[in-house]
Amino acid sequence: MSHLMNTYARQPVAFTHGEGVWLFDSNGKRYLDALAGVAVNTLGHAHPEFTAALSAQVGKLIHVSNIYQITEQEQIADKLCALSGMDEAFLCNSGCEANEAAIKLARMYGHSKGIDIPQIIVMEKSFHGRTLATLSATGNRKVQAGFEPLVKGFVRVPYDDITAVEQVAANNPDVVAILVEPVQGEGGVRTPDASYLQGLRKICDANGWLLMLDEVQSGIGRTGKWFAHQHTDIKPDVMTLAKGLGSGVPVGACLTAGKATGTFKPGNHGSTFGGNPLACTAALTTLSIMEKQKLLDHAATLGAWLKQQFQERLGSLQGVVTVRGQGMMIGIELDKPCGELVSKALESGLLINVTADSVIRLVPPLVYTQAEAQQLVDMLCPLVEAFLAQE
């Protein structure tokens, strides 16, 4: 019997190694990875250049305290701000930590404006993390249950509903920010109307609020742009990143621009492990390889092809609600819970995920070849067809 705390309903397989977009178990069976550790393994597994860079860094320096200057941390902050047009970056270890930083920053920003109890607008079906504050911001009662009392200070509205936000603006003078995912990942790979983020930007500008974008899952090339909001012409005041940033090495970031910049001063926020040389080397190497291999254009092109293939092969089936997504972030929504497809796919040598009970989520490594994308389509479609044909 394992001494691990029983916090995961794990699949009955343990992987020993990976190569590209394939994982191998202890029996030598190989699996096509269409999950990428839930949008984490941007470069797949055992990427030669990435492996060499991390090995070299381990041989030099893994960790030092943020009491001292860290060259690699300054370099990744510069790089992220160059790619995004943001002004400052705080380095941490995970998406929930990046979102915690954003929430703290919004509260401090509110206090600086004389608001005693700052409020943040958040969305239904959102997911921002499992720490107490990010859990409270999350729009999913299932993951909140049992952890009450939740942290106060969040006003919830429906996703992709500008009118609901305008109503809050007209009636709540204590709002200081909006926290929103440009694409909801855990909520079912839900993409909003093309004008949604622009509408939120206008409301924030009119009221002096911060627009805070949670790009933990949708950022780092996942949708075919460095950041999903770059499909529009807006820029956030705060943006959070993690998941794909380090290609498997834990690293997150909270970026600020404009009126959010300079909010934190020494002593206001910090992290022991955040931004250490190893994590920052992983992030810098990930971004460098993505640029050299032109993975943004690749994610946009191959992702559009995959989406089209799934629409053609599955879209007209009774029981398929919709196929949606951007780039290599695709959701196939069925009209009934389909969690059993995860284990059925595993048996077939395919790694997928089901979120929001009825949405097959595909977030593959961005290094898929055309042939591997075809394999994904050919492996998954029969599984969905057989599942829907069940009585």
Image (spheres, rainbow, N blue to C red):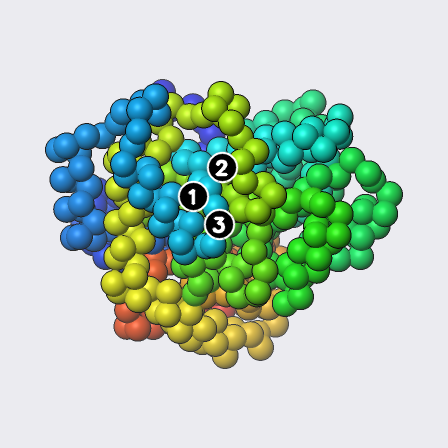
Q: Which residue is drawn at 27% across and 55% down?
A: 288
Give the label, 1 or 3, closer to the camera: 3
Q: Which of marks 2 and 1 is nearer the N terminus?
A: 2
Relative side of 173 to 36, left or right: right
Q: Which amino acid does label 2 sit on?
A: Ala
CA neighbours of label 3 inside 10 A, class few (<14), some (14 to 19), many (20+): many
Q: In this view, does 214 lie above or below 378?
A: above
Residue 98 disc label? 2
| Quarter of the image where the C terminus is located | bottom right
Q: Residue at x 44, y 40 (%)?
A: 89
Could you tell me how far apart the alpha carbons at marks 2 and 3 are, in whole angstroms?
15 Å
On the image, the x and y values in percent for residue 143 come to 60, 35
Mark 2 touching mark 1, by CB under 8 A?
A: yes
Q: What residue type is labelled 1?
A: Ala
- Disc 3 secondary structure class: loop
Could you tell me how far apart the alpha carbons at marks 2 and 1 are, in whole angstroms?
8 Å
Q: Is residue 281 above or below residue 21?
A: above
- Disc 1 secondary structure class: loop
Question: Which residue is the site of mark 3?
Answer: 86
Question: Which residue is the site of mark 1?
Answer: 242
Q: Residue at x 69, y 22 (%)?
A: 149
